[in-house]
Image (tube, rainbow, N blue to C red):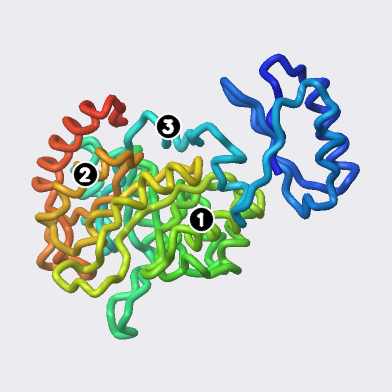
Amino acid sequence: MIIVLKPQTTQEQADSILSILEKEGFRHNYIKGASQTVIGIIGDTTKLDEDSFRTYEFIEDIKRVSEPYKLANRKMHPENSVYNIAGREVGEGTFNVIAGPCSIETEEQVIEIAKAVKKSGASFLRGGAFKPRTSPYAFQGLHGEGLRLLSIAKKETGLPIVTEIMSQQDLPLFEDVDVIQVGARNMQNFELLKELGKIDKPILLKRGLASTLQEWIMSAEYIMAGGNSKVIFCERGIRTYETFTRNTLDLSAIPALKRLSHLPVIVDPSHATGLPWMVEPLSKAAVAVGADGLMIEVHNNPKKALCDGAQSLTPEQFDNVMKKVATQVKFENKKLWQPQ
């Protein structure tokens, strides 16, 4: 249930409603926006007497929420969520690009790539320390050592880091990580999502290989229900019958999520297609349909990469893509975040 307050409602009047809800044992989400203030009620609202609330003259409207997700629902939070992450605004109006290698290999490799992507305009550095691989014999990442190398690159360049977590047991190792990524295979690892809900770090939530939009949003709800409201969706392609590309990039998911939820949405064209020459056109398309950012794989020597080299751009290719993306972002009246 959502209670919409009239614009002239005082804080004292709002608090009187919040007090009633707390006495009744309901959780609530109080959102005071620029144009509208709403109270989202979480719990079995069938027990609430809707008519009794309508007697308050400062209440404009009362709405029932039919969707199973509440905290991630735009009805509960009409305005777009915008987060400040290490001095970067992530969300509506500002466009961020996350770039870096699929996996961390050496100190020299990650620092060289970090400096290159920063020079081209990336605002975050990505890199895998823990790598979920289909084959148990494939390179699994450097784990704790990889996180240490990412921290070194962060100090060298000033770029905040984004990296994937595989298990809640590894959370203590992620203290220096700015954004924790949940990969497609772990989108419905509910025990992991619950633990991530207890921490105060932004979570980049990738879409599962065959997940519906509602399943994806419900995974975000798991994190938010634990108390962590900073969730960013990442569309990375879904599995279909098409084999020409690695996955099928669902660009329709971006405007759909924007209608259903208030959370930021970014796009990963590298994992979506597995083809480096497709990154540029799909990056521009992502901007056009309303994405708040991109995640792009970059490697200084893709042919010798230990993971996903075939889909990685060289620093030179990434620089060319960034020039095209910057033009598209400007055309859409957004601001491309640029490192200082």
Going 31% across and 46% down the picture, which residue do you hit? 98
Q: Residue furthest top?
A: 8
Q: Quadrant of the N terminus?
A: top right
Packing grade of label 2 (10 A; few <14, some 14-19, many >=20) is some
Q: Earlier in the sequence, mark 3 or mark 1?
A: 3
Going 60% across and 58% down the picture, which residue do you hit? 222
- Gap between marks 2 and 3, in whole Å? 22 Å
**Circle nearer the viewer, 3 or 1:** 1
**Residue 329 marker:** none
User: Which secondary structure lies at badge 3?
Assistant: strand
How far across and down, in percent of the image, does residue 271 sit?
26, 61
Q: Is residue 280 left or right of residue 29?
A: left
Q: Quadrant of the C terminus?
A: top left
Q: Amino acid at mark 3?
A: Glu
How far across and down, in percent of the image, does residue 7 sit?
67, 18
Q: Residue furthest right?
A: 23
**Residue 89 marker:** 3
Q: Residue furthest front?
A: 51
**Splitting the image into 4 quarters, where does residue 17 fall?**
top right
- Gap between marks 2 and 1, in whole Å? 23 Å
Q: Nearer the viewer, residue 229 or 54?
A: 54
Q: Is residue 267 left or right of residue 302?
A: right
**Circle nearer the viewer, 2 or 3:** 2
Image vertical order of residue 188 relative to residue 96, above or below: below
How far across and down, in percent of the image, does residue 190 sit?
58, 68
**Residue 285 marker:** 2
The residue carrying mark 1 is 217
Image vertical order of residue 331 relative to residue 299, above or below: above
Image vertical order of residue 262 relative to residue 113, above or below: above
Q: Nearer the viewer, residue 157 or 14?
A: 14
Q: Amino acid at mark 2?
A: Ala
